[in-house]
């Protein structure tokens, strides 16, 4: 098997404080969550007129816009000096490729 590759986006960058008050920069990498299909069931004893309208009603949820939801795949905590050391800091919505090899080594590459 080749390396595991996860293409994701930077979905959040925010400060984080541990239980001792130490400050970190938290960078969250996530992928867009896939939404399960909407299932609408109809009882068998409904009038025939309602059965004609049901296909139209099932399309309404698809027409409404929904905000994108993301599932975190990797969360990175950097100390302030580590964050400052980066010559190119991660930015919200950056596209990043996460590669994990057989030994478990992780490599992050900014794609865009």
Image (spheres, grey):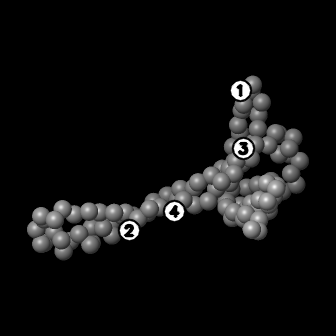
- The answer to whether the residues at label 3 and label 2 have Cβ atoms under 8 Å apart is no
Give the SS element for disc 3: strand
Q: Which residue is mark 4?
A: 34
- Of the numbered discs in the image, which one, if any, rests on residue 19? 1
N-terminal-most mark, 3 or 2: 3
Percent coordinates x, y for residue 79 in the rendering: 82, 39
**Residue at image coords 83%, 45%:** 83
Give the SS element for disc 2: helix
Q: CA distance from mark 4 to mark 2?
A: 17 Å
N-terminal-most mark, 4 or 3: 3
Q: Quadrant of residue 37?
A: bottom left
Give the SS element for disc 4: loop
Percent coordinates x, y for residue 14 in the rendering: 69, 43
Give the SS element for disc 1: loop
Q: Which residue is mark 2?
A: 63
Q: For this rendering, which residue is in front, 106 or 108?
A: 106
Q: Quadrant of the C terminus?
A: bottom right
Q: Which residue is mark 3?
A: 26
Q: CA distance from mark 2 to mark 1?
A: 45 Å
Q: CA distance from mark 3 to mark 2?
A: 35 Å
Crowd band around label 2 with a 10 angstrom C-alpha radius: few (<14), some (14–19), many (20+): few
Q: CA distance from mark 4 to mark 3?
A: 24 Å
**Residue at image coords 16%, 65%:** 44
N-terminal-most mark, 2 or 1: 1
Crowd band around label 1 with a 10 angstrom C-alpha radius: few (<14), some (14–19), many (20+): few
Q: CA distance from mark 1 to mark 4?
A: 34 Å
């Amino acid at each position: 098997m080749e390396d595991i590759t996860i293409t994701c986006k930077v979905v959040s960058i925010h400060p984080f404080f541990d239980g001792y008050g130490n400050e970190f920069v938290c960078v969250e990498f996530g992928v867009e969550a896939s939404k399960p299909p909407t299932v609408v069931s109809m009882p068998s004893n409904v009038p025939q007129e309602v059965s004609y309208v049901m296909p139209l009603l099932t399309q309404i949820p698809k027409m409404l816009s929904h905000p994108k939801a993301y599932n975190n795949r990797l969360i990175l905590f950097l100390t302030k000096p580590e964050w400052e050391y980066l010559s190119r800091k991660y930015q919200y919505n950056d596209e990043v490729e996460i590669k994990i090899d057989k030994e478990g080594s992780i490599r992050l590459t900014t794609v865009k």
